[in-house]
Image (cartoon, helix red, strand yellow):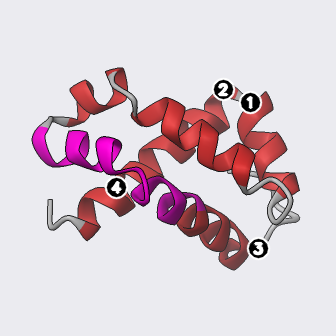
């Protein structure tokens, strides 16, 4: 994800930053607490991730552009960030 020129640490920092931003959205976090993954992906979560990506573009422009321009990257990132958030909820 994001190409070879980006270190794994940079990828993790970006993904963790986006996850942290999403975790500030109480409505989305409530959906994560009460729904299965398929329902979560059909709810507000994907848009919340996109909003978090846009908000963090200044700090993570390269990764944000890859997310916004490549649906495969977006899909992988959405799933990874979801896993991080669910783990934080003990799920």
Mark 1 near mark 4, Cβ–Cβ under 8 Å?
no
The answer to which image quadrant residue 86 occupies is bottom left
Which residue is denoted by mark 3 in the rendering? Answer: 7
Q: Main secondary structure of the magenta part?
A: helix
Disc 1 designates what residue? 70
Q: Is residue 10 left or right of residue 27?
A: right
Which residue appears at 41% of the width and 36% of the height? 45
Please report the residue visible at 52 percent of the width from the left and 30 percent of the height from the top: 47
Query: Callout 1: helix, strand or loop?
Result: loop
Q: Nearer the viewer, residue 62 or 59?
A: 59
Q: Are marks 2 and 1 in contact (CB under 8 Å)?
A: yes
Provide the residue designation for mark 2: 71
Q: CA distance from mark 4 to mark 2?
A: 18 Å
Residue tagged by mark 4? 83
Write down the region rendered in magenta: 18-34
Q: Which mark's residue is nearer the viewer, 3 or 2? A: 2
Q: Is residue 15 above or below residue 71?
A: below
Q: Earlier in the sequence, mark 3 or mark 2?
A: 3
| Label 1 or label 4, whichever comes before in sequence order | 1
C-alpha separation, residue under disc 2 versus residue under disc 1: 4 Å
Q: CA distance from mark 1 to mark 4?
A: 20 Å
Circle 2: element type: helix
Q: Residue furthest top?
A: 42
The answer to if 67 sits in the magenta stretch is: no
């Amino acid at each position: 994800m994001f190409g070879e020129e980006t270190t794994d640490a940079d990828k993790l920092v970006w993904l963790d930053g986006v996850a942290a931003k999403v975790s500030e959205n109480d409505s989305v976090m409530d959906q994560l607490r009460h729904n299965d993954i398929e329902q979560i992906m059909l709810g507000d979560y994907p848009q919340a991730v996109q909003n978090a990506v846009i908000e963090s573009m200044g700090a993570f422009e390269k990764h944000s552009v890859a997310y916004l321009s490549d649906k495969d990257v977006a899909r992988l990132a959405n799933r990874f960030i979801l896993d991080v958030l669910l783990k934080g909820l003990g799920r």
